[in-house]
Image (spheres, rainbow, N blue to C red):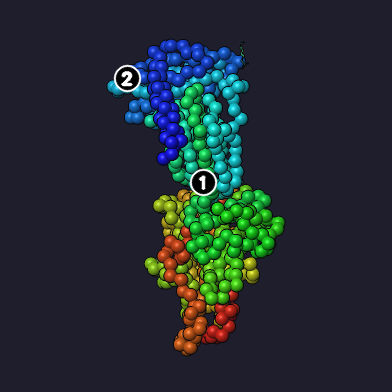
Amino acid sequence: MSSAGYLVTLLLCFAYSLAEEKSVIPEPRCGVTLSDPYKPVQIQVNEDADCGWTIDRPSNETTRVIFSLLDLDKSSDCSQENITITDENDEVLGVLCPNSPKIAVYEAPGKVYIRVSTDAKAGARTAYFLYYSVTPDIDLKCGGSVRGYSGTISSPNYPNRHPHFAFCLWHLQVPKNTLLKLSFTEIFIEIDPSCRFDFIALYDGPNTEAPLLNVLCGRTTIDLQTTSDTLTLLFSADYANSYFGFNLQYTALPQSGNSALDCSSDSMTVVLSPEYIDGLGYSPSDLALSDDTCIAQATNPIVFDIPYHGCGTTKKAENNIIYYTNTIIANQGSDVITRRKDLKFILTCELDSNSTVETMYLTTDEIIHDQQETGKYDVSLAFYETQDFITPVPQSPYQVDLNQIVYLQASVNAQDPDLTVFVETCFASDQSDFQGPTHDLIRNGCVTDSTYHNFPSGSEYARFSFNAFRFLNAQTSVYLQCRLVICDVNDPESRCNKGCITRQKRDLSSKGWRTNAVLGPIRLKRHIESESAGSIGEKNEEVVKTDQSNLYVVGIAVLVVNVLILALVLTRYYRRETTYRYRPVTTQ
Ligand SMILES: *[C@@H]1O[C@H](CO)[C@@H](O)[C@H](O)[C@H]1NC(C)=O
Ligand SMILES: *[C@@H]1O[C@H](CO)[C@@H](O)[C@H](O)[C@H]1NC(C)=O
Ligand SMILES: *[C@@H]1O[C@H](CO)[C@@H](O)[C@H](O)[C@H]1NC(C)=O
């Protein structure tokens, strides 16, 4: 270490020793009036206490009271043991209960009263608060609302010392279906074992009512993440010992899996984790939208902000629902030796007057997998080998014989026996993006294909079947897309109880959570002679073995609108393999 380094260390030790002197915090007796412009106060009471303090500040100033330690008897009931904060008009500003988070902030003009009541259980109770008048000279313009997918937040003046009485509140919002990954590259604020003095409070949600994720102070670095797409960060400093503050880098990451789609009223936003794309053998610069002049806006995370009118987005309107679709396509490049998988992310936003359904899935070489969304419920759709619905089909593509009946089960994974699944609409397409002509199996609950058969539905699942041969002929793949509704079994008004709705008008009033699921492809088993002859075809005949959670049982989330789609697809893959022979099949 250089001599300068030693000097810095020495100074820091000195700074910390100064900080420790702050441990002499006043513990005013019950009933005392506090009239200093600011004061840290440690409250110490025992059982059966009923103790009040008055903070006496002029009415033309705002008094801010910041609690940063709360140690009541956790086993006590709030009605017996609490700290009640009231303003000078006796309006209750707040009540701190034994199980309340330790950070709480109250503001009111003029006087503030703090009253501590404890129950009969023996033992000491502790709380700490700082109060001060928010005068114009200490009222910083800091914090604010931030929307985006990555960025930096730091304390005022960072990397220099933050001002005394700094009080900053940030609200961060990243795209729907993503969460915030937080990396504090530096935290250097006043040290205290319980972070009473200067602190960073992180709330896992849109405001300070959300659960407290963490409270940080001292000198450290830390990585954290939220559970949803919002974070609230409060930075509070007191009247002494200000250091260099903090620096936070945040990025949006998909909430579940590797991709997330957010449909807003004027655009869709896709967030992909860079590691995922790397693992698939591509780099962010290989990716573009249907209009290949539209590329990612950012690479960590990979973000596509896609306008509904532009970048090759297609629009379709049907039954008061508007569907916007686009595709992220990976450029194969000119690499002829190592053939990479043909990669596409298919994105659909369905908007109706009240709601949005996001559907996003990956196809590699025209095989659907990785449909991952988040929402109220996880729903999966899978092929089953037989009508006892015991064994899900373990491979993709699902290779079927001529005339074979295909069994499907849609299930909701919610551990709630009162939930039921209804297959509202299912259709088949020979394209994995369902952009071409489709064939309906069932629409709005009305069966439209003569081979479609509903099995009795049970708690948390719906089962049905149809004859695959109807759609399959040589070189055909079939993809399925289904709109599923999840309802409460006990609700007679739910969509699940309404069956076939024949009128063109969509029944918007019936209740249920709706979501989309996609599955496929189904292909004909190759004929024996082809099998032995077709060694070239063999190489490319990629049967993807998957674990259920990943490929076959496609986990998806029920958002707000219901769509269950089945699609049958003729893949480009087979179109390329034109030398490959299949048994000719007559279609009806
Ligand atoms: C409040 O009033 C007092 C005296 O009336 C004055 O000295 C003080 O500056 C005022 N404070 C503010 C914030 O206006
Ligand atoms: C707080 O405690 C006091 C005294 O036990 C009680 O009168 C009051 O109702 C409690 N407040 C709440 C919100 O329970
Ligand atoms: C839209 O949502 C509101 C509240 O969620 C509901 O009251 C209203 O009935 C809905 N309208 C339609 C057309 O579904």
Residue shown at 48% from the left, 39% from the top: 186
* Residue denoted by label 2: 47
Hey, what amino acid is under mark 2? Glu
**Ligand 1 appears in which quadrant?**
top right
Measured from the top left, where is residue 510 in percent x and y? Answer: 57, 51
Measured from the top left, where is residue 303 in percent x and y? Answer: 59, 54
Find numbered disc 2 in the image and state the secondary structure of the residue it sits on. loop
Name the image quarter holding residue 426.
Answer: bottom right
Find numbered disc 1 in the image and state the secondary structure of the residue it sits on. strand
Measured from the top left, where is residue 362 in percent x and y? Answer: 54, 63
Measured from the top left, where is residue 479 in percent x and y? Answer: 55, 69
Reply above or below: 547 against 66: below
* Residue denoted by label 1: 180
In the foreground, 474 or 123: 123
Hey, what amino acid is under mark 1? Leu
Residue shown at 53% from the left, 48% from the top: 251
Mark 1, other Cα within 10 Å: few <14 / some 14–19 / many ≥20? many
Say which quadrant the C terminus sits in.
bottom right
Q: Which residue ends up furthest to the left in the rendered image?
A: 122
Name the image quarter holding residue 569.
Answer: bottom right
Residue shown at 68% from the left, 55% from the top: 308
First in sequence: mark 1 vs mark 2 = 2
Reply above or below: 290 against 235: below
Reply above or below: 230 against 261: above
Determine which of the numbered discs, if any, sits on residue 510 in the image.
Answer: none
Say which quadrant the N terminus sits in.
top left
Asked whether, in this view, residue 143 is left or right of residue 34, the answer is right
Q: Which residue ends up furthest to the front in the rendered image?
A: 3
